[in-house]
Image: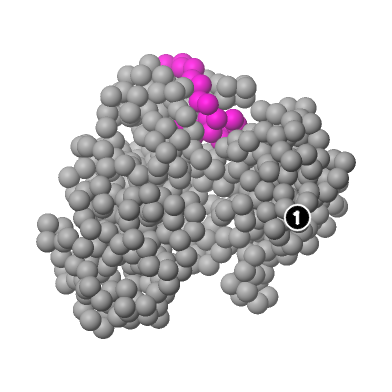
């Protein structure tokens, strides 16, 4: 089946007021669980299905009282809901998808539903780009709250101040993380084309998502679609440091404001300094006013993320001081350089980094923040792209800033095409050639044991993965807490086996 969004909207979608019972397929995904929470908050009866109710989203749904069927089957839909929302993890041959199509049950994609139920009477602020979406959108929400606004939001991470990645809020603002990944099996356009952006921040563009985009030109074409749909009275705030962004700015019909380190940027980052409290940075605003800000996150890349958020809000008329005060009050995002604990003098950090550029920036920021301390990087290549060989030669340079690197063997390697599969063992050999102490290990348990043998007081361990990494963070902290330090190996019990 190949059906465009417009066809679905015309023939398959009930009016929002006519819906009462809504069913979500793939409900435990980050975005889908958040959408389920928003729908429940708005008064709908919500339930759904997934292959497993894994944390943290499984726990979130349980706490919200949203029933989840484990496994997919026609019987789950026997009550015939008014609407089925189909996540992009769902394939055309899924038994529930087959049943929905066969029985003519109204259905939507996740981004279409988000737009249909929540955006038509709001002012959507969409944050998009290869890197920095979650942090930048969270900064936008935090600053808006600090100046007395009540924004709704849908973000692909947990905003620490709210303990959630979603919130209904009230008009006018709704902040969205705009993902370039495809929408659903029946709509292969990027998710963000559905989000009605009044304004957008474009943080970066480089090649990613090798499973759906063949090259950088295809990625640029996707982001061009976002730029083109911002209305003439809207605003595009774009990071001018990225050549690929500069290439597509001519497609904008709206006003364009640039930011970054580039000398001709409207909001130009002049300097930054990483402190124990975060990153202090100086910039010049569009009207040539020199300003100083502090964001409680380490690293140059976070100074630039904060600058993008500040530029958008200042251009919308918020006062410089209130915006800068809002940045300083930011409480962070879970899984973005989040300190999970300190045991036996070892600081354990969780970070979402998986693209080579994000890995490199994360390590550079931590090197600045924890200057003089040993930095141990643990990397899991588990995304659809990192399982492929496309970045095989880029990861050594991204990880070289660590003193030691432990790499997990690639999980679910069979999901990558034969002949195009990433080699964790080759990565460790390449790192050794660069003078980095590196080792490839099969799983989280073996990594936890190895870390507890080698970790010393004042070490910093950053665990980088886009998944739960088999609860490695807690395994390591538990082992350190139980005294499995340099003198002996982590016991099987402490490793969680």
What quarter of the picture does the C terminus occupy? bottom right
Image coordinates of residue 138 in percent, x first then y, are 42, 37
Residue name at image x 24 percent, y 41 percent:
123
- Does the magenta-highlighted stretch encompass residue 378? no
* Residue that sits furthest to the bottom in the current view: 102
Residue placed most toward the observer, 303 or 173: 173
Confirm whether residue 84 shows in the render: yes
In the displayed structure image, the side of residue 142 where residue 401 appears, left or right: right
Residue located beneath label 1 in the image: 492
Identify whether 277 is placed above or below 194.
Answer: above
Residue name at image x 20 percent, y 37 percent:
171
Say what secondary structure mark 1 lies in. loop
Name the quadrant containing residue 350.
top right
Identify whether 50 is placed above or below 361.
Answer: below
Name the quadrant containing residue 410.
bottom right
Which residues fall within the magenta stretch?
Answer: 288-306
Image coordinates of residue 183 in percent, x first then y, are 37, 63
Residue name at image x 57 percent, y 25 percent:
278
Confirm whether residue 238 shows in the render: no
């Amino acid at each position: 089946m190949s059906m465009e969004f417009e066809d679905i909207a015309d023939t398959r979608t009930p009016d929002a007021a006519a819906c009462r019972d809504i069913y979500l397929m793939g409900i435990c995904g980050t975005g889908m669980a958040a959408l389920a929470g928003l729908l429940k908050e708005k008064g709908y009866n919500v339930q759904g299905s997934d292959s497993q109710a894994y944390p943290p989203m499984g726990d979130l749904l349980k706490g919200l009282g949203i029933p989840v069927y484990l496994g997919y089957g026609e019987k789950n839909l026997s009550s015939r809901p008014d609407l089925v929302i189909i996540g992009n993890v769902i394939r055309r041959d899924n038994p529930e998808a087959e049943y929905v199509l066969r029985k003519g049950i109204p259905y939507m994609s996740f981004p279409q539903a988000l737009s249909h139920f929540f955006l038509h009477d709001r002012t959507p602020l969409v944050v998009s780009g290869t890197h920095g979406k979650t942090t930048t959108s969270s900064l936008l929400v935090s600053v808006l709250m600090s100046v007395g606004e009540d924004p709704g939001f849908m973000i692909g991470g947990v905003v620490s101040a709210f303990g959630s990645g979603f919130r209904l809020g009230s008009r006018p603002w709704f902040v969205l993380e705009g993902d370039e990944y495809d929408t659903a099996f029946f709509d292969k356009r990027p998710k963000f084309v559905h989000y009605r952006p009044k304004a957008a921040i474009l943080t970066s563009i480089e090649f990613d998502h090798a499973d759906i985009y063949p090259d950088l030109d295809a990625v640029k074409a996707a982001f061009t679609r976002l730029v083109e749909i911002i209305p003439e009275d809207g605003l595009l705030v774009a990071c001018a440091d990225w050549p690929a962004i500069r290439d597509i700015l001519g497609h904008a019909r709206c006003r364009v404001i640039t930011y970054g380190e580039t000398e001709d940027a409207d909001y130009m980052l002049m300097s930054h300094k990483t402190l124990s409290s975060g990153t202090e940075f100086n910039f010049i605003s569009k009207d040539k006013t020199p300003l100083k800000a502090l964001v409680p996150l380490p690293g140059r890349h976070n100074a630039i993320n904060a600058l993008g958020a500040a530029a958008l809000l200042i251009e919308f008329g918020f006062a410089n001081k209130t915006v800068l005060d809002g940045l300083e009050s930011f409480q962070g995002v879970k899984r973005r350089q989040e300190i999970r604990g300190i045991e036996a003098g070892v600081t354990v950090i969780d970070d979402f980094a998986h693209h080579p550029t994000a890995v490199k920036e994360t390590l550079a920021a931590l090197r600045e923040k924890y200057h003089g301390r040993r930095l141990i990087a643990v990397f899991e290549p588990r995304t659809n792209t990192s399982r492929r060989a496309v970045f095989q030669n880029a990861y050594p340079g991204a990880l070289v800033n660590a003193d030691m690197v432990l790499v997990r063997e690639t999980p679910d390697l069979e999901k990558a095409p034969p002949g195009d599969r990433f080699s964790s063992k080759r990565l460790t050999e390449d790192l050794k050639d660069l003078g980095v102490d590196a080792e490839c290990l099969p799983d989280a348990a073996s990594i936890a044991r190895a870390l507890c043998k080698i970790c010393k007081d004042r070490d910093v361990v950053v665990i980088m993965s886009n998944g739960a990494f088999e609860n490695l963070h807690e395994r390591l902290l538990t082992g350190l807490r139980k005294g499995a330090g340099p003198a002996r190996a982590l016991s099987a019990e402490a490793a969680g086996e």
